[in-house]
Structure formats: C-alpha cells, structure tokens
Image: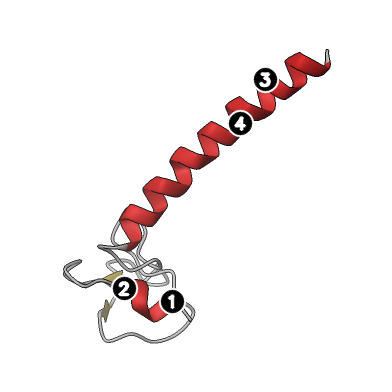
Amino acid sequence: MKAEYQKRLVQIAEIFEGIAAHATESARERCPYKNRRDECTAAFGCRNQRKPPVAGGLLLCRGDDKLDYRAAWQL
C-alpha cells in the first residue's frame, strides 16, 4: 500500500509540474491578470483596460501580449 501511495504522489507531482511549467511560459508573454477570454481580472486600474461589452462584466484587456511581464512580479 505504501508503494502504491508513493506512486500516486509521483504521478500527481508530475501533473502539477506540467501545469507550473505552462504557467511560467504563459507569464513570459501575457499579463497574469488576463484570462482566456481577454478579460482583466485585476482589482486595480491598468492602461490596457477597456469597457466590458456587457454592463457589469469584467473589463476587457487590450494588451498586445508582446511584453515580458515577469520583471514586474519578481523581487
């Protein structure tokens, strides 16, 4: 049982490693507050925000995704 448990932990770790690698790669090209629908989820203002198509909806992100945002989040 212990070996089976360890095997599953390794499988889960591999899955999360892939997710983390994808997130790191995405962060090189797009703002981390921009979702897959090009909506801004930030709780602060940004010059790339535009009015939502539906009143009360999330603001749209109009960033060009050609900036490397990593430096803004690294200390």
Q: Measure the C-alpha gap from mark 3 to mark 4.
A: 9 Å
| Residue linked to disc 1 | 73
Asked whether 42 or 60 is in front, the reply is 42
Q: Earlier in the sequence, mark 3 or mark 4?
A: 3
**Which secondary structure lies at badge 2?**
loop
Task: Kindly identify which residue carries mark 2.
Answer: 69
Q: Where is mark 4, residue-wise?
A: 12
Residue drawn where x is 27% and y is 71% of the image: 61
Q: Which x, y percent locates residue 52?
A: 30, 71
Mark 2 vs 1: CB contact within 8 A: yes
Whole-percent x, y for residue 29 in the image: 25, 62
Element marked by disc 3: helix
Q: Is residue 50 above or below residue 5?
A: below
Residue type, numbered disc 4: Ile
Kindly report which numbered mark, 3 or 2, lies closer to the viewer in this rendering: 3
N-term-proximal mark, 1 vs 4:
4
Q: CA distance from mark 3 to mark 1?
A: 35 Å
Give the Cα distance between marks 2 and 1: 7 Å
Residue 34, x across and y down, in percent: 35, 65
Say which quarter of the image contains residue 72: bottom left
